[in-house]
Amino acid sequence: MGPARPIAGGDGHERFGHDHFHIDDERRQAVCPAEQTSISWATTRSSRRTHVPLVQIRFDAATWRACPLRSKCTTAGNGKWGRALTLREPAQRAALQQRRHEQVTDAWRKRYRPRAGIEATVCQIVHRTHARRSRYRTAAATHLGHCLAATAINLIHIDAWQQGHRPERTRTTHLSRLLTHPSK
């Protein structure tokens, strides 16, 4: 139900994402936007605790250094291999691609809106009451702690409502607020 993260990195530059490359899973090859073919294809797992199956694709370093589209290329790579792509397995990649296309539609946003509010409330509970880890050992005491944390957040919401502080329609980041109202 949640949104899929964007493909390209958030470094502020327009770079090629995974969707700009032609990936042929059957032949185990990838072709970059500059029509260069990959030289290495390996299956691996993520280093995180989840051990997600991944495909690591590498391109020739000499070809990459002479490429006219190098400034728009992905930043992953090293001196020996040039550029590299790390992708999910084909089925997972297709599911993520489908989600990325869905999440730009109004129907998806409408369906996601309640979850976004719930996630904001959970975030508030975690940050205000430090409920990420239980202070208690038994399940009953932990449950009581969670109930008290939820009650505390509800009281905070009621107090804010009575004080005239209405919830915002959408969250505004601190950076966005600074950009719209710069200090003098």
Image: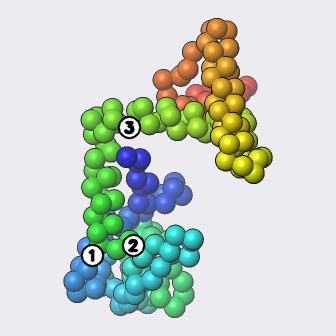
Label 3 SS: helix
Q: Nearer the viewer, residue 135 or 172?
A: 135
Instruction: Decide if residue 22 is on the left or right side of residue 132.
Output: left
Q: Mark 3 points at which residue?
A: 112
Residue 132 visible from this viewpoint? no
Q: Mark 1 points at which residue?
A: 23
Question: CA separation, marks 2 and 3?
Answer: 26 Å
Q: Which quadrant holds the C terminus? A: top right
- Residue at point 51% right, 56% down? 10
Residue 94 image-quadrant placement? bottom left
Q: Residues within 10 Å of mark 1 (few under 14, many from 20)?
A: some
Give the answer, above or below, for where 6 lies relative to 69: above
| Three-letter amino acid code at the position of disc 3 | Tyr
| Three-letter amino acid code at the position of disc 1 | Ile
Residue 69, how many percent across, how many down?
38, 72
Question: CA separation, marks 2 and 1?
Answer: 10 Å
Q: Residues within 10 Å of mark 3 (few under 14, many from 20)?
A: some
Residue 16, how many percent across, how many down?
38, 65
- Counting residues from the start of the chain, the first of labels 2 and 3 encountered is 2
Q: Nearer the viewer, residue 40 or 74?
A: 40
Q: Mark 2 points at which residue?
A: 87
Question: CA separation, marks 1 and 3?
Answer: 30 Å
